[in-house]
């Protein structure tokens, strides 16, 4: 009798200990969102700040100050993306095989320096070289971040993690649009570039001190939590491990080819919008730089709200493609509306820009969750880098052509039409993407960390 009672007590104690350990593991895993993601968000925000503020310099009179033509300024806007194109794949390979955090550390110093020099250099070809090198420095940041997140987050969390990263894009342009206009009014566009470049150099020190490549290296995560996370990630990789054994095979897959072409058109529409929106708004509304910045922030506010909402729905439902193409089609329709209304009503045309800007950002979270669910981890970094490289070419095409059309016609209508067509094509290509339903169903059976 007493023996049975002792066994029951011991079993109860063991259950309580297991429950306690599980609670400790879950608490430690939740710290990823508190310790890692803010650092990732700030880093990508700084990259996007130094990438997108060029449009405000153009709107503030960069061409007049430096005696450049409108077409030279549009070339300067586009040269960033040629540099951004150059080192995506080598950067992704380095991040996967060696260290993402040290690569990001070097990039922070490099792009902060180049961004600040944009406010110092006055010769066209030196400024062209600086813009190209700025793109080179920033080219490694996105693939490195995506590689880092695959080490820290499971499939059930990946759309939200990706969204938290990419939120640095619209959130940065949101506050940058509101503040940069007033900084330019107070200090001039050249000093504003310097002021906005220096923080990246300072942040590099914070980044390397607090961010680690893998959970097992983080002092704030318990060994049990790191082991549990590694187990789940390994289980997920068993499902996709047989597909695309090497990078060459992965890059020749039909779905990867479609994603690369699709991202070219998406980026052409997006970066044409980001880089030239301040100039389009100022010309259409004849407002001051401060008010132009405030007005330019509204599409990005819509983008932030939609990105958070869509990523939450995506992780809850495990749907990816079905949450990408509708928003891209709506973005294209919004910019088409701006094209049709630009000569009739600035207010209505700008309302369409808010719809277009919000919708073109909305599906980023589920979009970047597609590749890790279809391919094994030994090729994911290079594949995502190639897709992003294609986007860099699209960014060059969009930013250069929209700026060129603006300079050639003196009006924004032709640029609206170009961006609209690019986004409509991007949405239709996602509909054409080969189905991954079987792979997704297999992944649903793996246990996820929540």
Image: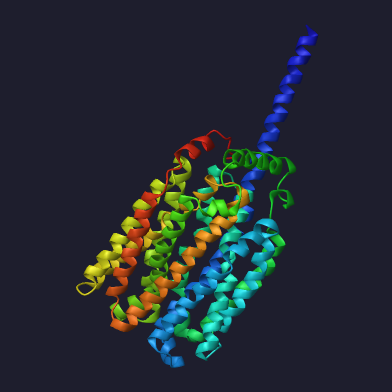
- Left or right of residue 399: residue 135: right
Q: Farthest left residue?
A: 344
Q: Residue at x 66, y 69 (%)?
A: 204
Q: Farthest right residue?
A: 3
- Which image quadrant for residue 36? bottom right
Q: Does residue 136 show up?
A: yes
- Left or right of residue 286: residue 135: right
The x and y percentages for residue 67 are 43, 93
Q: Name the foreground residue: 360 vs 135.
A: 135
The x and y percentages for residue 443 are 53, 38
- Left or right of residue 307: residue 334: left
Q: Residue at x 57, y 68 (%)?
A: 139
Compared to residue 321, the image places residue 98 above or below, namely: below
Q: Residue at x 73, y 15 (%)?
A: 8
The quarter of the image holding the N terminus is: top right
Q: Name the foreground residue: 197 vs 145.
A: 145
Q: Farthest bottom residue?
A: 67
The quarter of the image holding the C terminus is: top right
Compared to residue 361, the image places residue 222 above or below, namely: above
The x and y percentages for residue 5 are 76, 12
Q: Farthest top residue?
A: 1
The x and y percentages for residue 252 are 51, 53
Q: Does residue 182 show up?
A: no
């Amino acid at each position: 009798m007493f023996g049975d009672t002792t066994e029951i007590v011991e079993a109860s104690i063991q259950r309580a200990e297991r429950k306690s350990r599980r609670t400790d593991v879950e608490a430690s895993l939740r710290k990823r969102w508190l310790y890692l993601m803010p650092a990732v968000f700030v880093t990508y925000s700084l990259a996007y700040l130094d990438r997108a503020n060029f449009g405000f310099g153009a709107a503030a009179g960069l061409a007049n100050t430096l005696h450049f033509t409108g077409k030279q300024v549009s070339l300067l806007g586009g040269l960033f993306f040629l540099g951004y194109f150059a080192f995506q794949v080598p950067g992704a390979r380095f991040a996967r095989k060696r260290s993402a955090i040290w690569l990001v550390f070097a990039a922070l110093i490099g792009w902060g320096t180049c961004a600040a020099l944009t406010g110092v250099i006055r010769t066209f070809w030196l400024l062209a070289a600086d813009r190209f090198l700025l793109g080179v420095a920033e080219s490694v940041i996105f693939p490195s971040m995506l590689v880092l997140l695959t080490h820290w987050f499971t499939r059930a969390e990946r759309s939200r993690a990706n969204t938290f990263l990419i939120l640095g894009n619209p959130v940065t342009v949101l506050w940058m649009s509101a503040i940069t206009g007033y900084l330019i009014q107070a200090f001039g566009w050249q000093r504003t570039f310097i002021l906005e470049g220096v923080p990246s150099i300072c942040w590099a020190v914070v980044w390397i001190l607090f961010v680690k490549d893998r959970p097992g290296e983080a002092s704030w995560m318990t060994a049990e939590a790191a082991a549990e996370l590694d187990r789940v990630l390994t289980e997920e990789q068993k499902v996709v491990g047989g597909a695309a054994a090497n990078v060459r095979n992965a890059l020749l897959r039909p779905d990867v080819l479609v994603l690369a072409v699709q991202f070219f058109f998406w980026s052409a529409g997006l970066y044409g919008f980001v880089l030239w929106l301040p100039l389009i708004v100022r010309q259409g509304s004849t407002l001051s730089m401060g008010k132009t910045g405030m007005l330019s922030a509204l599409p990005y506010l819509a983008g932030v709200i939609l990105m958070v909402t869509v990523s939450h729905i995506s992780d809850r439902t495990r749907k990816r493609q079905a949450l990408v193409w509708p928003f891209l089609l709506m973005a294209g329709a919004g910019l088409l509306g701006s094209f049709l209304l630009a000569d009739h009503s600035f207010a209505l045309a700008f309302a369409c820009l808010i719809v277009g800007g919000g919708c073109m950002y909305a599906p980023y979270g589920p979009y970047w969750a597609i590749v890790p669910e279809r391919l094994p981890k030994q090729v994911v970094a290079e594949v995502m880098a190639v897709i992003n490289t294609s986007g860099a070419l699209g960014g060059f095409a969009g930013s250069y052509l929209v700026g060129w059309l603006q300079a050639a016609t003196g009006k924004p209508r032709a640029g609206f039409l170009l961006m609209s067509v690019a986004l409509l094509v991007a949405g239709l290509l996602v509909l054409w993407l080969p189905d991954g339903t079987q792979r997704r169903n297999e992944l649903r059976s793996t246990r996820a960390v929540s």
